[in-house]
């Protein structure tokens, strides 16, 4: 039997998801993870570098799991757990911190950007890449799906693992980033990149009314017969041939085309919205409990090896 490669990814809550997040990151991930021995981790300890409110933390953890399950991650086909449930992550992070240098960590983008903005970075933010390295290396993950902005962190993980291997003998496998390439940049209601910071989003889990309001606000110019901003979003939901027919039939009638788009969005997102609403907090706690047991089992086994190698096991 062919064994599947090990995949690990970490997720933090990014707030209310929009269809740009879905087609740019979530859908391609959902289409991929089953081909691997997949581990999906809620990076709650990483989130602690920016969250100082326990109720927000709790909500974010619940939301991120709910979102992933709603868009199609099946907890039976992957280990889904949260970082703080597996103490080995922080233990291994400490070990890596003892191997890498301060100037090396000072080159990390996340830290450098904060400092450049004059913000006081916490020691946690400074060490962030070593916690992430331990997330990955603890499970011998070979493949790490991340957005482009996380590429450097995977390099840091390779470097930490390499340093350990050179110092104590071969222990960790070399992880490779898998840069998630979705459909490219999804345009928002104003034609710019859809982004929550531009307030030009179509919500992924919005009600039909909320979606309709967002679609009706799509900026249309009156120069052509085809409203480009409507079409750009529409092509995510229907193929070219199908759209040809709709756009011919309603040539120049922007309202009709927007109505058609609302229907097509609704057909795709309604099942996900309903799924999301059906997942209770208790369901999520069960999923995470089960995931924590499985993750701990693997992590504890790996840490036994690590502890022996560094000589703290007598
Ligand atoms: P936002 O720009 O709304 O703050 P995030 O930065 O939280 O979105 O994005 C989370 C993920 O969703 C990223 O990995 C990114 O690849 C993807 N994503 C966000 N916006 C878009 C978009 N307009 N088109 C394609 N992918 C996107
Ligand atoms: N730093 C990642 C992000 O902000 C989240 C993350 C934490 C992660 N640990 C990870 C991603 C391990 C991949 C693998 O998106």
Image (tube, rainbow, N blue to C red):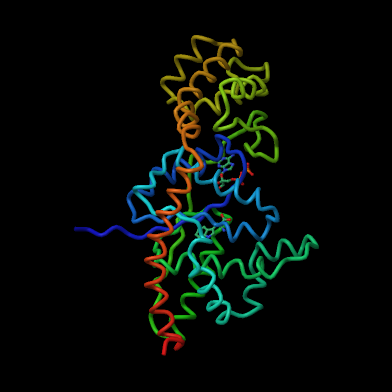
- In the image, 1 versus 109, the foreground residue is 1
Which quadrant contains ligand 2?
Answer: bottom right
Q: Which quadrant does the N terminus fall into?
A: bottom left
- In the image, 18 versus 183, the foreground residue is 18
| Left or right: residue 110 compared with residue 118 | left
Residue lying at the far front in this picture: please name it: 282
| Left or right: residue 21 compared with residue 295 | right
Q: Which quadrant does the C terminus fall into?
A: bottom left
Seen at 55% across and 57% down, the residue is 43
Residue lying at the far right in this picture: please name it: 118
- In the image, 154 versus 7, the foreground residue is 7
Give the quarter of the image for residue 295: bottom left
- In the image, 38 versus 199, the foreground residue is 38
Seen at 60% across and 49% down, the residue is 58
Question: Percent x, y for residue 222?
Answer: 68, 16
Seen at 56% across and 76% down, the residue is 94
Question: Percent x, y for residue 258?
Answer: 58, 17
Give the quarter of the image for residue 128: bottom right
Question: Percent x, y for residue 177?
Answer: 46, 60
114 versus 15 height, above or below:
below
């Amino acid at each position: 039997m062919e064994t599947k490669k090990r995949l690990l990814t970490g997720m933090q809550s990014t707030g209310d998801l929009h269809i740009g997040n879905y087609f740019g990151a979530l859908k391609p991930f959902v289409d991929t993870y089953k081909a691997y021995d997949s581990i999906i981790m809620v990076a709650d300890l990483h989130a602690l570098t920016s969250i100082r409110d326990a109720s927000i933390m709790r909500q974010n953890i619940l939301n991120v799991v709910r979102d992933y399950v709603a868009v199609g991650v099946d907890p039976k086909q992957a280990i889904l757990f949260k970082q703080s449930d597996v103490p080995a992550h922080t233990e291994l992070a400490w070990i890596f911190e003892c191997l890498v240098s301060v100037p090396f960590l000072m080159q990390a983008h996340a830290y450098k950007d904060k400092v450049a903005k004059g913000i006081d970075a916490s020691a946690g933010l400074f060490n962030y890449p070593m916690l992430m390295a331990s997330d990955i290396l603890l499970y011998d993950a070979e493949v790490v799906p991340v957005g482009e902005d996380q590429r450097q962190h995977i390099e840091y993980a390779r470097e930490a693992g390499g340093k350990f291997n050179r110092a104590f003998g071969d222990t960790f496998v070399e992880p490779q980033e898998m840069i998630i390439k979705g459909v490219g940049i999804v345009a928002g209601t104003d034609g710019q990149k859809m982004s929550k910071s531009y307030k030009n989003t179509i919500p992924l889990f919005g009600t039909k009314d909320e979606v309709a309001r967002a679609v009706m606000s799509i900026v249309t110019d009156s120069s052509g017969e085809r409203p480009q901003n409507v079409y750009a979003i529409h092509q995510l939901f229907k193929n070219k041939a199908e759209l040809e027919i709709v756009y011919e039939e309603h040539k120049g009638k922007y309202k009709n085309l927007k109505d058609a788009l609302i229907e097509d969005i609704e057909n795709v997102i309604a099942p996900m919205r309903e799924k999301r609403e059906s997942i209770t907090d208790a369901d999520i706690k069960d999923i995470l409990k089960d995931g924590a047991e499985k993750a701990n089992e693997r992590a504890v086994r790996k840490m036994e090896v690590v502890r022996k190698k560094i000589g703290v096991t007598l």
